[in-house]
Structures are given as C-alpha cells and as structure tokens.
Image: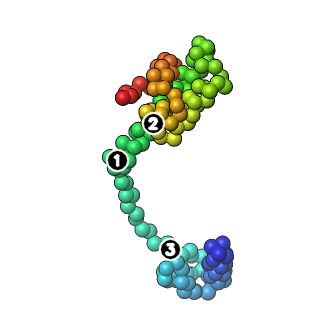
Amino acid sequence: MKYLTCLLLSGSILSNFAEAASGLQTSTLLLKNLVVTQDAGSFPQVPYQKTRNVYQSPSAEETKKRLAQEVSIQIANDIAYGLVVAHDKQQIRYGTRMYRKVQTAINLLRRGAGLNGASRRSGVPRSTLDQLMQWGQQRPGASPYHVE
C-alpha cells in the first residue's frame, strides 16, 4: 500500500513538472497543504524546519543494569578462558559432566544471570567458578572488576 501511494504521489509530481517545463504556470498541492506556484524551469521550494535533538540520558537504573550485564559478560569470558586453562592442566576434561555444567554457567552469565545464580542453576560449586575466573583473569586483555 505504501509503495502504491509513493508511485501515485511521484507520478503526480512528475506530471506537474512536465506542465511547468512546457511553460504553463500551475499551482500544485504538495505534502500537507503546501501550495507552491511554479514557473517554467523552477523547482518547488521545500520549507526548512529546524528540529531539536532531544537527548535523554539513561536513568540510573538503566545504567546500573547495563553495567551489571557487562560485568557478567566479562566474568563469563574469564570463566570460558579459565576452562581452557583447566583443560590444559587436566583438571576438567572436555565433554565431561562438569565441563558441560560450566558451559551452562557461562551461558547463564552471558544472558545476564549473576554469579551466584549461575552457580546454583548450573550445579557448579562457586569455588570452582572462582578458580576458573582466577585462571581466566591471567590472560592478556582481561579487565579487572570487583566480584562479591
């Protein structure tokens, strides 16, 4: 429907330009009752309207929520890297039940769950997640944060 309206509107504008080019002076109704008189070789003037940029700063609650989610993602990345280190140290083998549980905890953290909630829901002891986090924070590019 929008496409058809656009075609009809552009067709009427083009026909009015053709009349103006032939030397006829026409009065055309354009967009929201804007009446424009055209001479041959002239184009309709579009009114200039200045719009204000309205910036709404995020509320304190939105900022706190976004920051908590970013920290949760950083924790998940540290645990994921710590899981690789644990595999290299032959502490947690790939594909074992504990490995899958840690993967579940990582997914929960990336979806915004807290560390305690991810530990409880995945069935991984908090001490194991803390150890994996500690190993993961030793990688290059890991950002420091405070976890309670």
For residue 12, which numbered disc appears in the image?
none
Horizontal side of residue 116 vs 37, given as left or right: left
- From this view, report whether residue 123 is shown above or below residue 41: above
Q: Are marks 1 and 2 in contact (CB under 8 Å)?
A: no
Q: Which residue is mark 1?
A: 61
Question: Which residue appears at 48% of the width and 19% of the height?
Answer: 131
Question: Which residue appears at 46% of the width and 72% of the height?
Answer: 47
Residue 81: x and y in percent read: 55, 23
**Which element type, helix, strand or loop, lies under badge 1?**
helix
Q: Which residue is most to the top?
A: 89
Q: Amino acid at mark 2?
A: Gly
Mark 1 or 2: the one toward you = 2
Q: CA distance from mark 3 to mark 1?
A: 46 Å
Kindly indicate the quadrant of the structure image that contains residue 43: bottom right
Mark 3 or 1: the one toward you = 1
Q: Which residue is mark 2?
A: 117
Q: Nearer the viewer, residue 29 or 94?
A: 94
Q: Amino acid at mark 1?
A: Glu
Residue 64: x and y in percent read: 36, 42
Mark 3 or 2: the one toward you = 2
Badge 3 or badge 2: first in the primary sequence:
3
Q: CA distance from mark 3 to mark 2?
A: 62 Å
Q: Which residue is mark 3?
A: 45
Badge 1 or badge 2: first in the primary sequence:
1
**Which element type, helix, strand or loop, lies under badge 3?**
loop
Badge 3 or badge 1: first in the primary sequence:
3
